[in-house]
Amino acid sequence: MKKMLIVGYGNMGKVIAARERNRFEVWIYDTDPAKMNDANIDGFSILDNANNEHKFDFILMALPGPLEQKIFLDTTIPKLNAGGLVIDLTTSEPETVKMLNESLKKHGFDYVELPVLGGPPSIGKWVLIMGGSREKLEEVSTIFSDIGKVFYAGNIGQATIFKLLNNMMTASNAVIVGEVFSMARQLQINLADFYEVVNSSESAGKNEVFRVRFPKILNNDLKDTFSIELMEKDAYLALVLARSIKAYTPLTALTHQIALEAMKKNLGKKDIGNMFKLYDEHDEESKG
C-alpha cells in the first residue's frame, strides 16, 4: 500500500484522510498539536517533528495559505527523504506556487498545484484544477478518482489563478446573500417561501451560496465549512493579483473590506453563511 502524507488536518484534510484511508497508508502532519492529537484519536499515523527519514509516495498539502506553505517548505520538507509527488490543494498565489515548484525540485520532489472547487460536504464531487506538468495528469486523476474530477489548467500558477477568480465570485456572493437575508427578515416576509420561489427559478440571483446555505440558515444547521477569515484571505490574494496587472476590481475590494469588518465582530471563524450577522448588528445599532 502506497504511503500518503496529508499536511494540514483542517476541514479539508480531515475529509480527504477519511476518504483515502482504505486506499493508502495515510499519515498526518499539522503544526497545531491539538489537530495532531485529533488525527491520532482518529487512528492515523502522525509525523512527529522528532521523526525524520520518512519517505512518502504522495504528499498532499491542504493549508490555509502562502505563509503556511512556506513554513512547511522550510521546516518539514528537509526532514523527508527525497522523492514522491507533492500535491498542493492550498488556495495560494501564483508567485508562491512557482517558488514552491522550484524549491521542491531542488529537494528532489515533483510538484503540482491542485486547488479545489467544493467543500467538505461535497467530497466525491469536487472539481480539482491541476497546474504543472501534463505528464502528471493521469497519476493525479487516479489518486483523486474517488474524490472528484481533475481538470488541467496549464503550467504552474494557472490553477491558482482559476481558483482565485472563482473565489472572488464566491466572496461577493456570500456578502450579498447575507445582506439579502438580513433585509428580508426585517421586512418580515416568509423566508422559506422566498427561498423556494428563487431557488425554483432560473434567475441569475440564484447563486450557489444562496442555494446551499440559505436553507441551512433557516434550519439552524449551518456547519463551519468555509470560514469568513479564509474568504477574506482569498479576497486579499485576488486583490494582490489584480494589482499586479492593474485590473479594476472595486467589488472585490469592497467585499474584502466587509469581510474584515465581520472579522472585527468576531465572525472570522464562522462559515461565510453567517455574514448576515454583521448586517443584523449594524441594523440593531442604527435603530438604537
Image: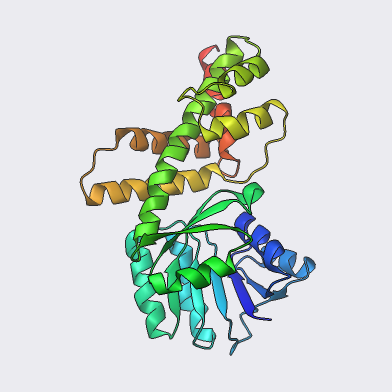
Q: Nearer the viewer, residue 188 or 49?
A: 188
| x and y percentages locating residue 7 in the rendered image | 58, 69
Eyeballing the image, is 256 above or below 163? above
| x and y percentages locating residue 178 in the rendered image | 53, 27
Q: Nearer the viewer, residue 115 or 267?
A: 115
- The residue shown at (45%, 25%) is 204
Residue 44 found in image quarter? bottom right
Residue 134 found in image quarter? bottom left
Quadrant of the drawing holding the C terminus: top right
Q: Nearer the viewer, residue 278 or 218?
A: 218
Eyeballing the image, is 146 above or below 278? below
Q: Is residue 132 left or right of residue 150?
A: left
Q: Which residue is the extreme one toward the front?
A: 138
- The residue shown at (68%, 41%) is 223
| x and y percentages locating residue 126 in the rendered image | 56, 52
Eyeballing the image, is 225 above or below 51? above
Q: Is residue 202 left or right of residue 123?
A: left
- The residue shown at (37%, 84%) is 106
- The residue shown at (43%, 48%) is 234
Q: Which residue is the extreme one toward the left?
A: 246
Quadrant of the drawing holding the N terminus: bottom right
The total of numbered circles placed on residues is 0
> How is colour applied across the structure in the image?
rainbow
Residue 70 in view (yes/no): no
Q: Nearer the viewer, residue 155 or 286?
A: 155
Residue 139 in view (yes/no): yes
| x and y percentages locating residue 19 in the rendered image | 69, 62
